[in-house]
Image (tube, rainbow, N blue to C red):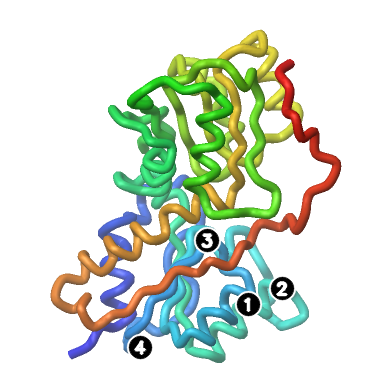
Amino acid sequence: MGVTLRDIVAAADLLFPPETAMSWDRVGLVTGDLDQPVRHVRFAVDPALPVIEEAIAEGADVLITHHPLLLRGVHSVATTTAKGRAVTRAVVADLAILCAHTNADVADPGVCDALASACGLTDIDVLTVEQGQGLGRVGRLATPVTLREFAERLAAALPATNVGVRVAGDPGARVCRVAVLGGSGDGLFDAVRRAGVDVYVTADLRHHPALEAREESSFGPPYLVDAGHWATEWLWLSRAAERLIAALGPLGTTVETSISIARTDPWDFLVGVNADGGAR
């Protein structure tokens, strides 16, 4: 007997328990019949329509994404809206969609561990606890490096994006202790300061919270690295695929996995960059 969507959901729930998601989150199965057969599982960060079309073209039966498709309430899935087009396309093509969001962020290993690994961290611990779950990670570099070298190494480890990596801090400052949070992270500045780190790697840093954080530190550590939302979370996909196959046991040998490399960052190009990135 082959693998069904029921098996995939059970394995995903084991790896990323829905009850560990933040209270505001919406995770789990979005489309699909639990009894439908599954031979190919596709992984992606966003359940955007181009990603759904890509999964269908690749012959996937299930699309597992990090971000939820229906995080906020909708009242229609007619094709007159973007959400409606995405849901309708998946349903018509018998493509099941399953989301693991903050339950994958807090998982051990999960999204934050993949980012910590890309940073080259050791002695990894939880950054903070929210709603009873360990969120973010803190660790150390094997050897201290300059902030510029750290950012360049991280950029090389991340998938390429159209806007690169933003850094706030003295390029020549020595850094060793690092905090990370994949995706949006400017809500954890208090925890980052308490952790006593040299640099904080996250994404979606807004002007006012980031500026206030730099002022609080008198423009010293923790320095800030905004490595991009999509890029910092994409790193998790291959690990999630490997763990899912392992969780399926002997049935896993009948399932193919693939990773979407479609960049779903909303930015297409960058102009007017201060190329020398001089110190403040």
Amino acid type for the residue under numbered disc 2: Ala
Amino acid type for the residue under numbered disc 3: Val
Query: Which residue in the structure is indicated by mark 4?
Result: 36
Residue 224 vertical position relative to residue 107 in the rendered view, above or below: above
The mark closer to the camera, 3 or 1, is 3
Q: Seen in the image, is 104 located left or right of residue 203?
A: left
Query: Real-space Cα distance between discs 4 and 2?
Result: 26 Å
Query: Which residue in the structure is indicated by mark 1?
Result: 86
Q: Position of residue 196 (x, y in %)?
A: 45, 14
Amino acid type for the residue under numbered disc 1: Ala
Residue 219 lies in what quarter of the image?
A: top right
Label 1 close to label 2 by CB (< 8 Å): yes
Q: Which residue does the image show at 63% across and 77% down from the upper left?
A: 86
Q: Position of residue 186 (x, y in %)?
A: 61, 32
Residue 225 vertical position relative to residue 44 in the rendered view, above or below: above
Label 4 close to label 2 by CB (< 8 Å): no
Characterize the local packing of mark 2: few (<14), some (14-19) or many (20 or more) Cα atoms within 10 angstroms. Answer: few
Q: Seen in the image, is 173 located left or right of residue 33?
A: right
Label 1 vs 4, first from the N-terminus: 4
Q: Which residue does the image show at 30% across and 44% down from the upper left?
A: 108
Label 3 vs 4, first from the N-terminus: 4
Disc assigned to residue 82: 2
Query: Which residue in the structure is indicated by mark 3?
Result: 45
